[in-house]
């Protein structure tokens, strides 16, 4: 039986983390005019939008935000429930751009592998970087994020749940435990 969720980050801590991550992107991306944030559906999209808003506050630069659905690029379609793909949209051609892929949690790395395959169908960015809110470990592929909000070591039976104002009406990160 699952235990009660444990709050890892509250709304204020999450807000500060997004500010810190946005500052790191600003510090490390050479040409912000070539930057495109691409959120991976579902929680990566509003997270990318929050990062873009924060970068605009910090630098006065409007960073374009795209959204990426990786449903048809997954290697486990036979193991997941049927889902309706979300819209993939990019504000411009990604060729030559610095793309920062944004996701809420990285676990095995398979979602990111699928995202990289999908990005190749939409252009050839000059650089692709990865930003995640939570890195919970247990990688199955050699993928490592460039920007990490929090490293949260977990057991395989645990689940990290990210709540964002849009679509969840609250901001928080919780750790849920199940039977090992």
Image: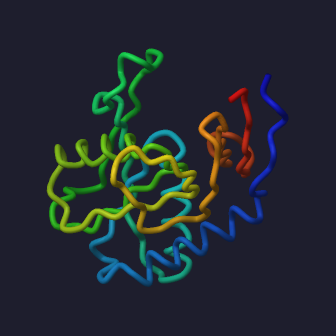
Query: Residue at (66%, 41%) from the top-left corner?
Result: 161
Q: Looking at this view, is 4 or 63 the one in front?
A: 4
Q: Is residue 153 left or right of residue 121?
A: right
Up the image or down, 99 lies above or below 82; here it is: below
Q: Is residue 46 visible?
A: no
Quadrant where the image shows the C terminus: top right
Tell me which residue sits at (30%, 76%) in the image: 33
Q: Position of residue 137 (x, y in %)?
A: 53, 51
The answer to whether 2 is drawn above or below residue 67 in the figure is: above
Identify the coloring.
rainbow
Residue 46: x and y, percent?
54, 50
The structure residue drawn at horizontal position 64% and vertical position 56%, both measured from the top left corner, is 152
Q: Nearer the viewer, residue 180 or 150?
A: 180
Q: Quadrant of residue 50?
A: bottom right
Q: Is residue 174 left or right of residue 115?
A: right
Q: Nearer the viewer, residue 139 or 46?
A: 139
Q: Position of residue 32 (x, y in %)?
A: 34, 78
In the picture, measured across the screen, residue 143 lies left or right of residue 124, that is: right
Position above or below: 12 against 107: below
Residue 137 appears in view: yes
- Foreground pick, 42 / 63: 42
Count of number-bearing discs: 0
Q: In the rendered image, which quarter contains the N terminus?
A: top right
Residue 123 falls left or right of residue 43: left
Residue at the outermost right position: 4
Residue at the front extreme, as displayed? 180
Q: In the rendering, at what x and y percent does residue 13 appear?
A: 74, 65
């Amino acid at each position: 039986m699952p235990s009660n969720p444990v709050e890892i980050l509250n709304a204020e801590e999450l807000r500060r983390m997004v500010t810190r991550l946005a500052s790191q992107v600003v510090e490390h991306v050479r040409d912000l005019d070539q930057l495109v944030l691409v959120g991976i559906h579902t929680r990566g999209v509003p997270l990318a939008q929050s990062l873009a808003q924060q970068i605009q506050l910090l630098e006065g630069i409007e960073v374009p935000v795209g959204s990426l659905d990786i449903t048809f690029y997954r290697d486990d379609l036979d193991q997941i429930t049927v889902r309706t793909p979300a819209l993939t949209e990019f504000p411009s051609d990604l060729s030559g751009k610095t793309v920062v892929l944004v996701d809420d949690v990285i676990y095995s790395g398979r979602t990111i592998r699928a995202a990289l395959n999908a990005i190749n169908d939409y252009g050839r960015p000059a650089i692709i970087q990865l930003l995640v809110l939570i890195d919970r470990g247990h990688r199955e592929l050699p993928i490592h994020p460039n920007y990490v909000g929090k490293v949260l070591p977990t057991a395989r039976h645990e689940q990290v749940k990210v709540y964002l104002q849009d679509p969840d009406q609250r901001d928080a990160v919780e750790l849920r435990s199940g039977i090992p």
